[in-house]
Image: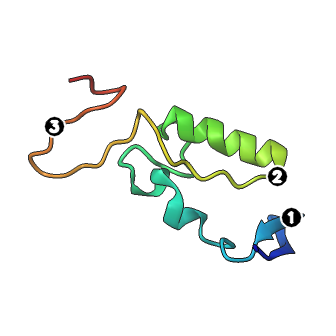
Amino acid sequence: MANFEQYRHHGELVWVNSELKGKHRDHCLCFSCGRFKPGVPETNCPKANLNYAVCIVGGLTLPVYECPNFYKEIANMPKVGLLHPE
């Protein structure tokens, strides 16, 4: 059975599964995406901007597990996804 705890995150008292606390960056696809430009909304991925807005308004932390815009820049790998159709 999971254990839950409360703590302050960005000034707001929130609940979290103790085993997952602080691990959203390890799980979130955005942190491995070439389109992710946190702090620069003008050039950041629009889906990441939307996710961030929902997090701010709702006081949530929402890791992304699946995304059509994901882009991992690897040499000789074709660009695929919503912004780079095959």
Q: Name the residue furthest right.
A: 13
Is residue 71 depicted above or below 32 in this figure? above
Q: Earlier in the sequence, mark 1 or mark 3?
A: 1
Q: Residues within 10 Å of mark 3 (few under 14, many from 20)?
A: few
Task: Name which residue lies at 29% across and 49% down.
Answer: 72
Label 2 secondary element? loop
Q: Amino acid at mark 2?
A: Gly
Which disc is residue 59 wearing? 2
Disc 1 and disc 2: Cα gap in Å? 8 Å
Disc 3 and disc 2: Cα gap in Å? 37 Å
Label 3 secondary element? loop
Which disc is residue 78 wearing? 3
Disc 1 and disc 3: Cα gap in Å? 41 Å
Which disc is residue 30 wearing? none
Horizontally, residue 73 falls left or right of residue 31, namely left
Q: Percent from the top left, x then y, of residue 77? A: 14, 44
